[in-house]
Image (tube, coloured by chain):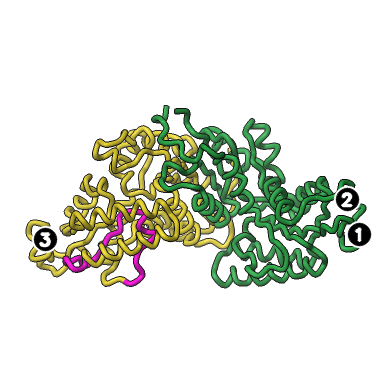
Chain colours: A yellow, B green
Amino acid sequence: MPERPLLGILGGMGPAATAAFYTQLVTRTPATRDQDHLRVVMWADPTVPDRTAALTGAGPSVVPWLERGVRALRASGADVIVSPCNTAHVWLGPVAREQGVELLSIVDATIERALAVGGSDGAVGTSPVEAGPNGVGPNGVGPIGVLATSATLGSGLYQQALGERSRVALLPEPPAQERLIEAIYRVKVGTPAALEQAAAALADVCRQLVAAGATTIISACTELSLVLPGARAVPIIDSTDALVRAVLHRFHQPGTSSPGTPGPPS
Amino acid sequence: MPERPLLGILGGMGPAATAAFYTQLVTRTPATRDQDHLRVVMWADPTVPDRTAALTGAGPSVVPWLERGVRALRASGADVIVSPCNTAHVWLGPVAREQGVELLSIVDATIERALAVGGSDGAVGTSPVEAGPNGVGPNGVGPIGVLATSATLGSGLYQQALGERSRVALLPEPPAQERLIEAIYRVKVGTPAALEQAAAALADVCRQLVAAGATTIISACTELSLVLPGARAVPIIDSTDALVRAVLHRFHQPGTSSPGTPGPPS
């Protein structure tokens, strides 16, 4: 029996978000025994420099770290690579392409999930410039709030992907964005008090986005996945959840979920 | 600045126990930012054949899988290897030695923790053969109950390590051991109902060990870590917890917990 594919996880950015992603992946894999689970190799080097500082030029480039991580995963035999870090995707696409390994993008997974949950792109031609008040297009599908690091927003990854699907990205006002960044760093601190502060700030920013007209919110930062509000005025799309879904869809096609015990490794 | 050491985790046996170990390691690392965390590479191939079947000869050898996992971790640059699977340690010592990589043993970590929590080995000469009724030695330190897979028990790893420290290992009676094995496989199923059944069975087995005289219990299976009883008549030493402690002790020596951002990778 041919060996099953190996999933490469480029993690560590940050470690708690990586642990949550791996835990969700394991918990949600349809399996009743060890051997039904996905084969995984993970590279989690949290010494990657600060991603936001890298994008603004205030810190060193992260590309050498990403290159090394992808190289280690590739050398270990990874067939497909994922990274539970949205900001890393600012640089990760070209790095994966150069090393000839497929990247299952968290941005694509999250956008797809947002369109599935929050409504399709509706009428052709509903481009951002044609959107009405508050970005609501003629098809009645409203703007999508995007919660992300300033580096992710600065790269335009989400705005462009939404624009290509004729959806308007609604970003937090600068003071709210500052609170959001602070919340992300509080999650990285990780104490109960820090997590509580982060959750409160995130809930505030979500309320502001809804007040500004957002009919769906994308949480495009895996640290925020750890402190998402329970009560929700509009659907909140969690990028960690979306990536888990995409991986399970890709690796657990019907009929392949119980492949039996493969032969010994070569 | 020299690069910080890389921890290799040989996981996947099973995946939920591995996720819990990594999550605990991240949560308990003294860190306020990503860059303070440990550098980790993980190989988690759950298609390793059943360990118990391997030891009894009822299934294929697991050694080729362990060899490949250690080789992948070594090739990725791991300086020290750990495995959050007690049963794997039946074979892992020789595999790591042959490949020239240090293994930080979960068995050693757990035994050390048990002796620290449940009393030292006391008077010199309190060997198992000299133990009194119920295995209580003249120093009043009682026997240590051991919860583990039949493969781990069959290997004698824990019994030997305890004997060398003049402590008596108290094993569950055969019917209780069968219930324990069933509980471990229920944890691998992982549904809420299965976890509840496993927790109930484990609590029963713990009660029987205490009734038989155990003054400390070692939970020497990382699946059991997920369903340990909250109410405890005697200290229960959790091997997942013990391994996390050992890793943090080894990697976070005083003065090295905030090493700053190292130079770019070579």
Crowding at label 2, few (<14), some or many (≥20) Cα neighbours within 10 Å? many
Circle 2 residue: B126
Identify the residue at image location x=20%, y=52%. A159
Crowding at label 3, few (<14), some or many (≥20) Cα neighbours within 10 Å? many
Crowding at label 1, few (<14), some or many (≥20) Cα neighbours within 10 Å? few
Stretch of the chain drawn in magenta: A210-231
Q: Is residue B200 left or right of residue A163?
A: right
Circle 3 residue: A126
Observer-nearest of A258 and B137: B137
Amino acid residing under circle 2: Thr
Q: Residue A208: tell me if it is visible.
A: yes
Q: Residue A80: tell me if it is visible.
A: no
Identify the residue at image location x=18%, y=57%. A173
Distance between the alpha carbons at the discs numbered 3 and 2 = 83 Å
Return the residue found at the far front: B255
Identify the residue at image location x=41%, y=52%. A189
Q: Chain of mark 2?
A: B
Pointers 3 and 2 in contact (CB under 8 A)? Answer: no
Circle 1 residue: B132
Amino acid residing under circle 3: Thr
Distance between the alpha carbons at the discs numbered 2 and 1 = 10 Å
